[in-house]
Image: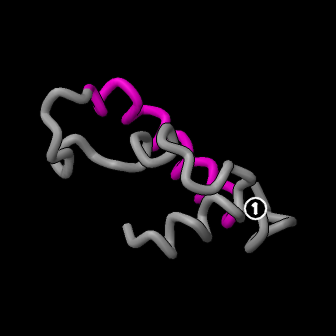
Amino acid sequence: MSDAARGAFAARWGFPSGSPWLNVALTHRSADRDHGRQAERLEFLGDAVVGAAVAKALVDAMPDPVD
């Protein structure tokens, strides 16, 4: 994810810009160059943030869905 995309995401969802925790949460462990860091412990947070973004987009796209 580019720095611009990360900044836009942080601004849209109210996260502090440049938050190291947000960067860790949004970085998959396969992309972690520093093997000493335990990014996988926060990977679930990244998954939850993506899930929340998708849910919000669906609610916005279909405000009155038929069950």
Name the side, left or right, on which 63 lies relative to 41. Answer: right
Q: Amino acid at mark 1?
A: Val
The residue at 48%/42% (across/down) is 20
Q: Is 59 in front, or is 12?
A: 12
Q: Main secondary structure of the magenta part?
A: helix
Q: Residue at x 29, y 30 (%)?
A: 40
Q: Is residue 50 above or below residue 66?
A: above
The quadrant in which the N terminus is found is bottom left
Q: Position of residue 25 (x, y in %)?
A: 43, 41
Does 22 lie within the magenta span?
no
Q: Position of residue 8 (x, y in %)?
A: 61, 70
For mark 1, what is the residue? Answer: 59
**Image coordinates for residue 11, horizontal then vertical, percent:** 70, 63
How are the colours assigned in the image? Answer: one colour
The C terminus, quarter of image: bottom right
Residue at the outermost right position: 64
For this view, does 51 lie left or right of residue 46? right
Residue 24 vs 65, above or below: the answer is above
SS label for mark 1: helix
Q: Is residue 24 left or right of residue 52?
A: left
| Above or below, 62 relative to 54 | below
**Is residue 39 one of those drawn in magenta?**
yes
> Which span of residues is magenta-colored?
38-58
**Residue 58 appears in which quarter of the rendering?**
bottom right
